[in-house]
Image: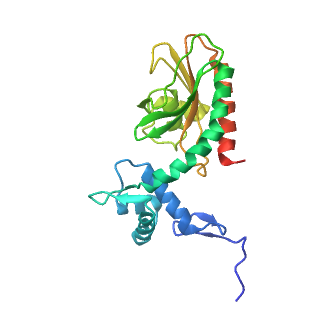
Amino acid sequence: MAAKPVAERGKDDAGSTMSSTTLQTLDRGLHALTVIAQHDAGLSIAELAERLAIHRTIVYRLIATLEGHGLVMRGAKGQLRLGAGIVALSSRFEPQLRDAAQPLLERLADETGAAAHVSVPQGEECVAIMSAEPKNTLLRVAYRIGSRHLLTRGAAGIAILSGRPERRADPADVRAARSDGFSITRGQLQTGAVGVACPLHLHDDPSFKFEASLGVVTLGQADVNGLTATVMAHARELRTRLRGQ
């Protein structure tokens, strides 16, 4: 019997077109992790099957495999949540992130004269995980690592939300940031502070699973157009670095 050509394309059980080079089970498992990560309260098997558009029997097999590697855990009521194995994976990514981002953050801070930062979502909050301050300014704003605020407040959080697929419940500033490619806020977290941030993940690029934003914050009068252009350019560069391109 002749072998099926490598270039042939087919459809999975959900009806989506897939390349023959895609491992369907692995693709589903990774998709399952992404969906579970988006629901802090957890998901049932039935809810996950509905969101993946595949049969529950397949989801049971996927979850059993992910549980075996510590990537998924079940709560007391059977709700699926991310497991501790995710922490181990993320800790191995952190050195790569720092190597790629820290020099760029320092350059961004010096070029803008503003505090630069990388922030990530944790539940409903936005948390700063990296920062840099300009070297040659007399007055500066410090952006403390570990500082947190609601995702719906401040440029960094709004930028993260704008990088996600559109939802009906999205507030106007998130919709505007998704359209513009950046978020600008004034005085939301601190009186007189101006924040500019861009998402590092993009809703139209599902291959980039790491959710984060790159931004700056400064006090008083600022050249917002100049800040925005500089932040966007550095965000594009950091995305490229994180992909290893």
Up-down: is 205 above or below 129? below
Q: x, y (%) of residue 150?
A: 41, 31
Q: x, y (%) of residue 11?
A: 59, 69
Counting labels gives 0
Nearer to me, 140 or 182: 140
Q: Tell me how the rendering is colored.
A: rainbow
- What residue do we see at 52% from left, 48% from top? 91
- What residue do we see at 51% from left, 42% from top? 166
Which residue in the rendered view is the most extreme toward the left? 76
Q: x, y (%) of residue 16?
A: 57, 63
- What residue do we see at 50% from left, 29% from top? 173
Residue 164 visible (yes or no): yes
Q: Is residue 143 left or right of residue 20?
A: left
Figure quadrant of the N terminus: bottom right
Q: Is residue 78 left or right of residue 33?
A: left
Nearer to me, 56 or 241: 241
Q: x, y (%) of residue 31?
A: 51, 58
Up-down: is 99 above or below 232? below
